[in-house]
Image (tube, helix red, strand yellow):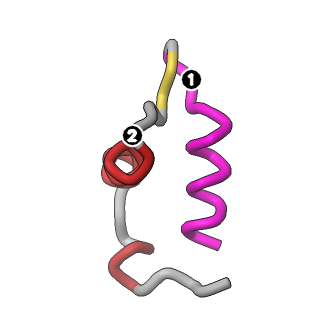
Amino acid sequence: MQKPDQKDQTLSDEDLRELYEKDTGKNAEWRGKLTKGYLEWKKEKLG
């Protein structure tokens, strides 16, 4: 598994949510809570 470059590590949570939504076409947040899919994607992305 590759580590993200420095640019990815400096993204804010809001930026990461937007990136997730753009990459997957799914919502990162649903009914005021972060989705399991987003949390797994974030964990994989940031290592």
> In the rendered structure, does residue 38 fall within the stretch colored magenta?
yes
- Under mark 2, the amino acid is Gly
- Say which element carries label 1: strand
- Mark 1 burial class by Cα count in 10 Å: few <14, some 14-19, many 20+: few
Relative depth, front residue between 26 and 39: 26
Earlier along the polypeptide chain: callout 1 or callout 2? 2
Mark 1 and mark 2 in contact? Answer it, CB < 8 Å. Answer: no
Which region of the structure is painted magenta? 32-47
The disc at residue 4 is none
Q: Residue at x 67, y 37 (%)?
A: 36
Q: Quadrant of residue 26?
A: top left
Q: In which quarter of the image is residue 11?
A: bottom left
Q: In this view, does 2 lie to the left or right of 31?
A: right
Q: Which residue is outermost to the front?
A: 25
Q: Quadrant of the N terminus?
A: bottom right
Q: Residue at x 37, y 71 (%)?
A: 10
Separation of residues labelled 1 and 2 (CA atoms): 17 Å
Q: Is residue 29 above or below residue 2?
A: above
Q: Where is residue 33 in the image (x, y as percent from the top left)?
A: 56, 23
Q: In this view, does 30 lie above or below 38?
A: above
Q: Is residue 28 left or right of residue 36?
A: left
Q: Which residue is drawn at 32% across and 48% down?
A: 22
The disc at residue 25 is 2
Q: Nearer the viewer, mark 1 or mark 2?
A: 2
Q: In which quarter of the image is residue 45?
A: bottom right
Q: Name the residue under label 1.
A: 33
Q: Position of residue 25 (x, y in %)?
A: 39, 40
Q: Which residue is outermost to the top?
A: 31
Q: In which quarter of the image is the C terminus?
A: bottom right
- Say which element carries label 2: loop
